[in-house]
Amino acid sequence: MKFSKKMAGQGKKMNETDSVTRLSGDIYENVRELESVFGPDSDLIVRFFKLKNNRDFIGANIYIKSLVDRGTVNSLSVELSKLKCGARNGEFGINVDTFMSNFSGLREAKVGYDYEALFEDLLAGNIVLLIDGCKKYLAIMADSDEGRQVDEPSSQTVIRGPKEGFTEKIECNILLIRKRIKSPDLRVEYLSLGSITRTRVSLMYLHRIAKEEIVREVRNRLNNIQIDSVLESGYIEELIKDDRYSIFPTFLSSEKPDSVVGALLEGKVAILVDGSPYVLTVPALMIEFLQSSEDYYHHFIISSIIRFLRIVAALLTLLVPAIYIALTTYHQEIIPTPLLISIASQREDVPFPALVEAMMMEVTFEILREAGIRMPRAIGPAISIVGALVLGQAAVEAGIISAVMVIVVSITAISSFAIPNYEMSNAIRLLRFILMLLAGVLGLYGIIMGTIILSLHLCKIKSVTVPYLTPLAPKIEGKNKDTVLRFPLWTIKDWSTGVNKADGARMSGNNPVDQRQKEKPEF
Amino acid sequence: MKRLLCVFMTMLTILITGCWSSREVNTLAITISIGIDKTENGYLVSEQVLNSRAIASDKATMESPIVIYTAEGNDLTEITRSFTAQLSRRMHNAHLRMVVFGEDVAKEGIQNILDYFARNYEFRTDFYLVVAKNATAKEVLSILTPIEVIPGLDLYNSLKMADKEWAPIKSVRIVELINSIIADGKNPVLTGIEVSDGQISPKSTDVLQQSGGYQLLKYTCLGAFNNDKLVGWLDEDESKGYNYLAGDVNSTVEYAYFDDVKITSKIIKAKSKTRVYLLDGKPAVEVDIKIKHNIENVAGELDVSSEENKKVLNEILANKIKFLCEKTLDKAQNELRTDIFGFGEAIHRKYPKVWEEYKKNWDNEFPDLPVDIKVEAEINQLGQIKKPLFLKEKE
């Protein structure tokens, strides 16, 4: 039970000034103490029981009603009623091992000595068994399985590939990963974070592939977090991010077990947080945010083209409105004449400068997008009708917006949805506004300045000590076979990207089909 | 705090400068063509400005797609500025497609005008220059065109197309024009533009509602310059000849007679090579023209598929082209006395020392330059059918 040891350790750390309060031998005192901590009218249930053959024996099973599985409680009660114990009251402590052995075959159980650990075990959904005259307690695992079932992920949909998504339960998520890597190399470390919430967090990595420095760094950072609550993996990301002001995500969050497994196999470290279906993997490289797990399931040529398309989409999202503004307000001479004439005729009645026009439309789009996420599902069609009318027809017909602008906004919007990662999409969409302002003030010069500064920033930031643009910049020769393009599996002899151990690289696949054999089929 | 101040000051430097050079598209008057005529006071400049409101497809008005603004004055820059007094928008010259010189201006010399076009940063170098023949530039610009509603674009595109498909036309841009004016021993040519015959002058969109019968603009032939002055016009044959000699033919059509059989060929490739040599210490020129052609039409009874006849066909076509070239050469040497072919330049390249003697007096020496023209033609394809359809088999 590594996990509870860790938790106890964590608990100690939190209250370093307090000395550990040990359980007393008097069961009634212990129960009183517990009741005072949890308060009156709580859902803490204390049930005293006596053994059939030994009326002197007083025990109590204590649990929190909402956390435990009702079936387990019942079966435990039945078992307890059948138990026999020859020891007299007060001497029970000596025979606790015998007592435990009656349970150990059936359930996970462990022994604790102090209140801190007792609280934690109770709150983790254990049934705590106290016995009068004994300064120990027995915690029996009985947490309920209530929660969402494994479902299709809502944020990362695929056509081909597994459709399982993580759930809010950490055990279930670990199971989903373990199921895919049947190797003893897969290490799972538990810790609990949040002084109030005591959220369970686990760290997973492949021992033989992941770099020790990186694992150590992540572990240290996690252990040094001081916060009262962790409600989602976003908390952890924000707290242990390398460049905390950068809007680019440096932790890849995924809802899909297969992409997390892929990351683990590349030597990355996964951080799972109880209560969140998003699993973080670090170090996350820029290029990963433009990749999808599906890329590996389709033909490599198609995947490469689609990856390229996504990069183009990301650039379009970033640049199209800015370039439109720059060209129509500063550099009309580089627009082809027929296009300029067409733009000029459309912009004839538009009362706003291109920058204002673009800002208005882009902000409208952002509002629509945000509304689309927040609103109740039932009124979805309503907003799309209003959006289409406001953004499109009506604005153009009223002469407030030019038709080209609608096209520009649409291209931006569609492109932004082609970015597979939502956080990356957010970052790029935000930067688009900055570039639009620069374009409106300085024209193409501003766009170039903006993109240079952006590139410098991307070169500078790191994800857990690894440069963000690895393996493109710093360029690692021969290790770019899985970046913009995806090379076929049999050509990648070395999967390492500077993130994993040099000797722990994955083996490449081979093509066992004899190429010569194919030419002369046997019939 | 210090960092914040830094960011703030950087923002100031960017933002306070403001958008001082920004100009929205709907504050611009996009000039499509410029016409320059000569008047007593100097120049009459006509600018063909896009009326973008009339072009908008969804709210088209009956207004003309272009508006002609004219101003007179002695100085081009001054005239251009004076347009601001006539219209509410700033003239935007970057999309200029055509410059039309009136014949008078061209005869007087266009050197100073070209300086204006070359120096002003707003002009690009991809517009074409033409000379109005038998018309003023203003007249040419004010004619509306059907199909392509913006006359300037219509002129631009049709010149571009004709340059590729029709031998008598040559499209000239400003860089080429200036280079051939500057060069020793080479003089420029410019295509002439004419207003075709017609009952009505289409200066109103009402006229364009008819299917035809109104005046159109058309390119005719080349005007030969001596330095920057127009000295005369080549006719259509001579213009063709010029382009064959200069190697500017991309594709065109040529017909020739073999007895009473008319054979039309599509020229698909024409190359010319100018070779200079010394004849008794004096320079002489030999021009080799190589032609590839497809048979387009055989009007008469001739089996073009036989090898002998092919040879004959090649020969008569070569002779026809040679005739055209010689006609051009004759006119340039004896009538116009201007070296539009750049033979002087070729001599300069090969015999720089000999050229020194001729350089100063080239206009007078050029007419006496012996030029030998050789034409070789080769049939490429006979078309979809080999023998003429109505050929009677000899029995």
Image (tube, coloured by chain):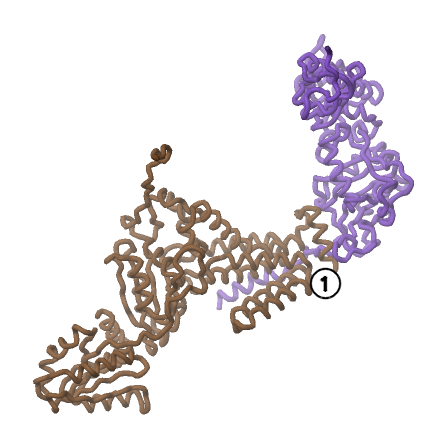
Identify the secondary structure beneath mark 1: loop
Which colour denotes chain B? Answer: purple
Residue that numbered label 1 is attached to: A399
Could you tell me which residue is drawn at 31 percent across and 71 percent down? A200
Q: Where is residue A441 in the image (x, y as percent from the top left)?
A: 62, 58
Q: Quadrant of residue A149?
A: bottom left
Q: Is residue A508 left or right of residue B166?
A: left
Whether residue A334 sits left or right of residue A100 in the image: it is right
Q: Residue at left 26%, top 77%?
A: A142
Disc 1 chain ID: A
Which chain identifier belongs to the brown chain?
Answer: A
Looking at the image, is B8 positioned above or below residue B54? below
Q: Quadrant of the C terminus of chain B?
A: top right
Q: Which amino acid does label 1 sit on?
A: Gly
Residue A88 spot, x, y in % from top left: 8, 88
Image x and y of residue B294, in percent = 69, 23
- Nearest the eye: B51 or A522: A522
State the residue lying farthest toward the top: B280
Residue A156, above or below A378: above
Q: Is residue A401 left or right of residue A157?
A: right
Q: Is residue B352 visible?
A: no
> Is A463 placed above or below B244 here?
below
* Residue lying at 34% horizontally and 77% vertically, measured from the top left: A197
Residue A170: percent from left, percent from top: 33, 69
Asked whether B207 or B117 is in front, the reply is B207
